[in-house]
Amino acid sequence: MYEYNPPPYFDLIGSIVWSLAEELARARRRRLQRIPVPRGKTLRPGPSTPCWNLLVANVEPLLRRRGAKALLAREVGLNRGRMTDFFVRRTAMPDAERLLRLLEWYAWRLAEDRQRLLFRNGAPTPTPPDRQVAKVTKHPTNVRITNIR
């Protein structure tokens, strides 16, 4: 075939382009690396936790009364100092189980306050449904349960 001489700077330009391509690939790999997720670390309250901030803002008025935080701490199963960390200092958040208990307590308090407000306004309080007592009658072949009102 045909033989030709490469240009004088062909090897130099090729090595520069090759090293530049390697450097770009290395930079791309660094940029695409996943940010390591800190395992086992507790999420701290702040601007990145809007749901927690909303819950704290809604629960805080319910804790103004003397002893309310202590009662909530007893209900949730933590000590009073931890409640202060959650709602006054805002430096900590509860774990999932305690958060569910806290939400349950909050829902109960809202229902209780709504009931109290209805009672003050003169609206009739809803009467609880008749308590159903089960009477068990034993027959030779089966057990029959009937409701007594």
Image (tube, rainbow, N blue to C red):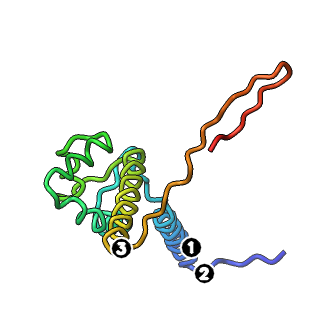
Please, is residue 149 above or below residue 125 in the view? above
Count neighbours of disc 1 (C-alpha within 10 A) and say few if under 14, some if 14 to 19, many if 20 or more.
Answer: few
> Helix, strand or loop at disc 3?
loop
Q: Residues within 10 Å of mark 2 (few under 14, many from 20)?
A: few
Foreground label between 2 and 1: 1
| Amino acid type indicated by mark 1 | Gly
In the picture, measured across the screen, residue 39 lies left or right of residue 3, that is left
Q: Amino acid at mark 2?
A: Pro
Earlier-in-chain disc, 1 versus 3: 1
Q: Which residue is mark 2?
A: 7
Tag nearer the camera, 1 or 3: 3
Label 3 to label 2: alpha-carbon separation: 100 Å
Instruction: Measuring from the top left, give residue 80's x and y in whole percent.
Output: 19, 44
Which quarter shows the N terminus? bottom right
In space, the residues marked 2 and 1 are separated at their CA atoms by 11 Å
At mark 1, the secondary structure is: helix
Earlier-in-chain disc, 3 versus 2: 2
- Secondary structure, mark 2, is loop
Q: Which quarter of the figure is the C terminus placed in?
A: top right
* Residue 133, quarter of the rendered image: top right
Q: Residue 48, can we see it?
A: no
Measuring from the top left, give residue 148's x and y in whole percent: 65, 40
Q: Would you place residue 27 above or below residue 141 in this image?
A: below
Give the amino acid type for the residue marked by disc 3 in the picture. Answer: Gly
Q: Which residue is mark 3?
A: 122
Residue 103: x and y in percent read 40, 55
Q: Which residue ends up furthest to the left in the rendered image?
A: 66
Circle 1 is placed at which residue position?
Answer: 14
